[in-house]
Amino acid sequence: TRSAEAATSRLAFDQVAANSLDTITVPAGYKWHVLASWGQPLWSNGEEFNQASRGTGSSQELAFGDNTDGMALFQNQGRNILAVNNEYTNRDIIYGNRESKLPETADDVRKGKAAHGVTVMEVVSKDGKWEVLKDSPFNRRITADSPMEITGPARGHDLLKTKADPTGTQSLGTWNNCGNGRTPWGTYLTCEENFNGYFSSSDENFEIPAALKRYGVSHKDWGYNWAMTDERFDISKNVNEPNRAGYIVEIDPMDPKSTPKKRTALGRLKHENAELVVASNGHVVVYMGDDERGEYLYRFVSKDKYTVGGDHSKLLEEGTLYAAKFNDDGTGEWLALTPTTTGMKDMAEICIHTRMGASAVKATTMDRPEWVSANPNKVEAYCCLTNNKNRGKKPNAGGDDTSVNAANPREANKYGQIVRWEPMNEDHSADKFTWDLFVLAGNPKVHKDDRKGSANVNEDNMFNSPDGLAFDSTGLLWIQTDGNYKNEGDFEGQGNNQMLVGDPETGEIKRFLVGPKGCEVTGITWSADRRTLFIGIQHPGEKDTGSHFPDGGDTTPRSSIVAIAREDGQTIG
Ligand code: FEO
Ligand code: CA
Ligand code: CA
Ligand code: CA
């Protein structure tokens, strides 16, 4: 089924054309089916998704959450356990049965909180189709109300103490879980991103501390209305609660009774994903983006070393945080955030006010760092810089300069780029690196200046706003987009959000998949035999884009996980 041209490339599939269809398009010779959709029950005492009511608080607590994002498939004695983030809720869709399309009642808020967090579920392959195993002992929902343990330097700090938790060691819930990571010791990392959008103030004159403003906390939430039933989200009553969110949380997917651990040592930011590698000297290195215009790219290096079969419970509790500096000459360095370099009091404060630490060391302001992925075949890592309308126009929330620089080279960057770096001495824990741009996205159909993109972008493979990013085990780079899908003006010819594959050696990029209307494509993991590729379709039909994915007809659009396989059953990538 392959064309002669495809057979000569490492990207061995026929490129999919851009389109604006309300379905998933894959190359000839590939097929797909839906594994799980928002509202689908994980236990047999849960209700099937109700198209009219769109679910209630109690049905949602027993069901897959909304807006699927980062995920990882784990194997345990032949069983497949999928851990997956449910980032946020599409309020106008999940409350679309109400005239206001907003949460109005206490049960609406209960449903909204339950649609967030993480889902752990066992999945099985039957007659060539993957499905969720209802009632598996591994099935679990972690929501905005689940107990968490706070670990690391900030544990017990005054800034983390609240009325409900005077010790500052136990928080409730995780929300806005964006990308993910996984550890070699078998745990799942979920990354708290836009945690600020859930807080509001019942006192409109309440003076918001500057440190909360840096993270975008304001008097109004983003339409979730959680403070209506839960005082934790009213900052005039609980000013420290936002300091307990914005972390990376470690979860043991094999133990449904385990308490998730907030890892404050990895810093507090709007975490995108967590790419964990073991450096050549045994230290654990975690690369992390802070997805906000003009914010920074971070690295954590563990104090202790990883050993196979050793005790891993404290590896993510102690270490050094760094922010990246990309020099215009193609060199770069990781700047350590310490009391000396930042002028901050101690590591606890650095782990809570991490953005201020990065500003203090004068790291490089970036065009919204999204996912990072490390190449399994070479000591190097890549990061999507999705776009940044403020580049060269407006400082970041800390007042830091955002003039164009070589790594973020375009003013009011509409299309984004992917930067990659090679650490010195093939050591991810080294403090120096060299870097270049793998791709500068653009539109060569519309523009002839630098907005046309780099040489590996053409009218057939063009895209905007790279976001999700993952190497497969063969060393091909899968790129997922979350950008403008209007297919007009600057984005004419780019169609819906999509997934592409890049070859890190040649720079070649080909479009592998196009998603349905209004979606972004985010989250990616493989079956152990690499014959199934799982991806997430998030927010189909947002902003009245008219999607009815995946069920068609006049059904409610539902965020879904999709399984992709080759018709001939061979491996993917
Ligand atoms: Fe949740 Fe930056 O994407
Ligand atoms: Ca993202
Ligand atoms: Ca994005
Ligand atoms: Ca998203």
Image (tube, rainbow, N blue to C red):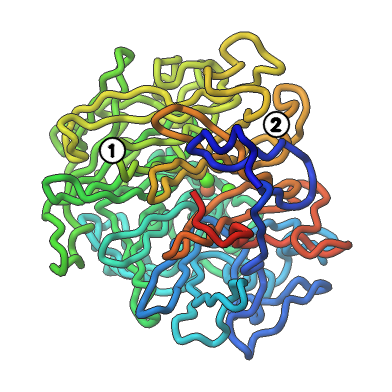
Would you identify the image quadrant in which residue 332 lies? top left
Residue at mark 2: C-beta within 8 A of ligand 3: no
**Three-letter residue code for mark 2:** Gln
Mark 1 lies on a secondary structure that is loop
Residue at the spot x=63%, y=69% of the render? Answer: 36
**Three-letter residue code for mark 1:** Lys
Picture coordinates of residue 291 (x, y %)? 46, 39
Residue extending farthest bottom: 45
Of residues 345 and 543, the one nearer the viewer is: 543
Left or right of residue 207: residue 26: right
**Residue 563 visible from this viewpoint:** yes
Left or right of residue 201: residue 171: left
Task: Measure the C-alpha gap from mark 1 to mark 2.
Answer: 31 Å
**Residue 209 visible from this viewpoint:** no
Residue at the spot x=66%, y=80% of the render? Answer: 59
* Label 1 Cα neighbours within 10 Å, binned few <14 / some 14-19 / many ≥20: few
Residue at the spot x=62%, y=31% of the render? Answer: 463
Picture coordinates of residue 523 (x, y %)? 52, 54
Would you identify the image quadrant in which residue 42 lies? bottom right
Mark 2 lies on a secondary structure that is loop
Residue at mark 1: C-beta within 8 A of ligand 2: no
Residue extending farthest top: 449
Picture coordinates of residue 270 (x, y %)? 44, 45
* Label 2 Cα neighbours within 10 Å, binned few <14 / some 14-19 / many ≥20: many
Q: Earlier in the sequence, mark 1 or mark 2?
A: 1
Left or right of residue 461: residue 121: left
Residue extending farthest right: 554
Of residues 169 and 251, the one nearer the viewer is: 251
Q: Which residue is mark 1?
A: 378
Q: Which residue is mark 2?
A: 494
Left or right of residue 266: residue 518: right
233 lies above or below 53: above
